[in-house]
Image (cartoon, rainbow, N blue to C red):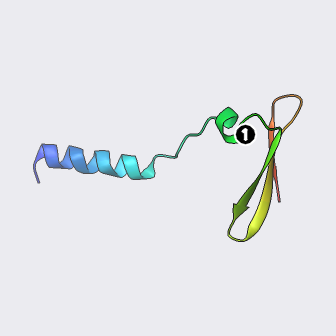
Amino acid sequence: MSRDEKQDEVGQTLKRSAALRIDSANLLAGAREILIEHKGETYRLRCTSNGKLILTK
């Protein structure tokens, strides 16, 4: 395997393992809380008055 092929393989691995980053303002879309469905369960994501995020089941 050439050096370029190794670098490409490493780059592809990093792309697959990188976490998706979403700005909380975009996620909440102006709301103080949202409901998130995950595997049949409902979770509540709430922004507190201090600007902290709380996720509860």
Q: Residue sitting at 38 percent across and 47 percent down?
A: 15
Residue 55 placement (x, y as % from top left): 79, 50
Q: Residue furthest front?
A: 30
Locate the N terminus by quadrant: bottom left
Residue 31 placement (x, y as % from top left): 79, 38
Q: Is residue 34 visible?
A: yes
Residue under label 1: 28
Q: Residue furthest bottom?
A: 40
Amino acid at the residue labelled 1: Leu
Q: Is residue 55 above or below residue 23?
A: below
Q: Is residue 6 above or below residue 48?
A: below
Residue 11 placement (x, y as % from top left): 30, 45
Q: Nearer the viewer, residue 27 or 8?
A: 27
Q: Residue furthest right?
A: 49
Q: Nearer the viewer, residue 56 or 1?
A: 56
Question: What secondary structure is found at the residue carrying circle 1?
Answer: helix
Q: Is residue 57 left or right of residue 27?
A: right
Q: Residue sitting at 40 percent across and 52 percent down?
A: 16
Q: Is residue 47 above or below residue 12?
A: above
Q: Is residue 46 visible?
A: no
Q: Residue sitting at 76 percent across and 67 percent down?
A: 41
